Amino acid sequence: MSNKNYKYTLNEGFTEEQRNFYEENGYIVFRKLIPEKDIDICHQRFLDVCSGKVHVPTVMKVKKLGPNGETRSEFTVNKIQEILYDEKFFDHYAAHPKIVEVIKMIIGPNVTAVHSMLINKPPDVHEEMSAHPMHQDLHYFPFRPANKIAASWTAMEDVTEKNGCLFVLPGSHKGPLFSHDYTESVKNKLYHGVFGFNDVPKVMFPMEKGDTIFFHPLLLHGSGPNFTQGFRKAISVHYADSKCDFINVIGTFQEGISKEIESVAEKNFKLKIHINTVWKMKSRLICGEQGVFQQIDSHL
Ligand SMILES: O=C(O)CCC(=O)C(=O)O
Ligand SMILES: [Fe+2]
């Protein structure tokens, strides 16, 4: 098997079975990869962001008020983003040695974290604000090659089909990047989805606290609504080979989303920022050599 032509993974750290699995399916799950203590620190940090004690650049809400009339709490905040420059999230998740070890096996030794988020699904939120439509993460990324990008996604508590676990379409990483847009059924800003996959059987991923899935940016995936009275929290970072190159998205499927991301940045910064600069501002070097992402001082 050592003569096999691997396309989606790079180094030999995986067992042969693990490596073949990622190559064939576009994802791999490691049970209990992240220790509880690290997740608990990230959870507390999330609560501190909700309460305003700690600042991160992007805090998105799914509800105006929580049960005690509060505007920002675990009951109203559904997502925080750009958490790479918060040292707690960085040390206890994004640069966690357990994560970085696997990421290096997929994309190689020069690793930049390019996107980061903690996604919460509070109880009692309308289905269309709680679900995440089927999509490919590459839709958002104006850099290539796709095989040198990978996501890690870790359950921060038990996630089930009832509270909105991830679902994926195994093997879809071998296909093309599809056109994405706002779907009928999901209303959150920037939550684009693909069309025509509603009836395709998906594989559901119930996971326990600390379980981690790594996946390819072309893998079709999404998550259901939270129908329970509890929360569904996960933390997720996307990594790219620092030596990736930016592409020109004008005239491609990605032009629309890129303009939308630019307009969000323009609103926040009160100045026009090119899409590539936005991604440079979001990113942070994890290990190895710096590449195209680390050329500016300011970050998000
Ligand atoms: O956590 C979710 O519901 C979806 C997350 C996702 O799409 C991602 O991490 O790329
Ligand atoms: Fe995604």
Image (cartoon, rainbow, N blue to C red):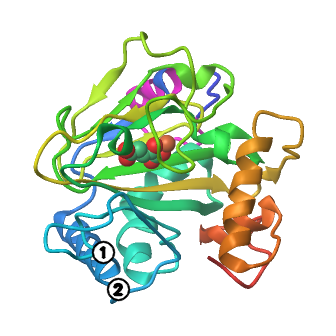
- What's the residue at 38%, 86% (across, down)? 54
For label 1, the SS is loop
Q: Earlier in the sequence, mark 2 or mark 1?
A: 2
Q: Is residue 290 above or below residue 234?
A: below
Part of the protein shown in magenta: 9-24
Instruction: Report whether the residue tagged 2 is closer than 8 Å to ligand 1.
Output: no
Q: Nearer the viewer, residue 201 or 240?
A: 201
Q: Is residue 153 visible?
A: yes
> Label for residue 52?
2
- Image side of residue 246 versus residue 48, left or right: right
Identify the amino acid type marked 2: Gly
For label 2, the SS is loop
Identify the amino acid type marked 1: Arg
> Is the Cβ of the residue at disc 2 closer than 8 Å to that at disc 1?
yes
Residue labelled with disc 1: 72
- Taking the view exactly as shown, the residue that stands out farthest to the bottom is 53
Q: Is residue 98 above or below residue 228?
A: below
- Image side of residue 295 versus residue 90, left or right: right
Q: Is residue 15 visible?
A: no
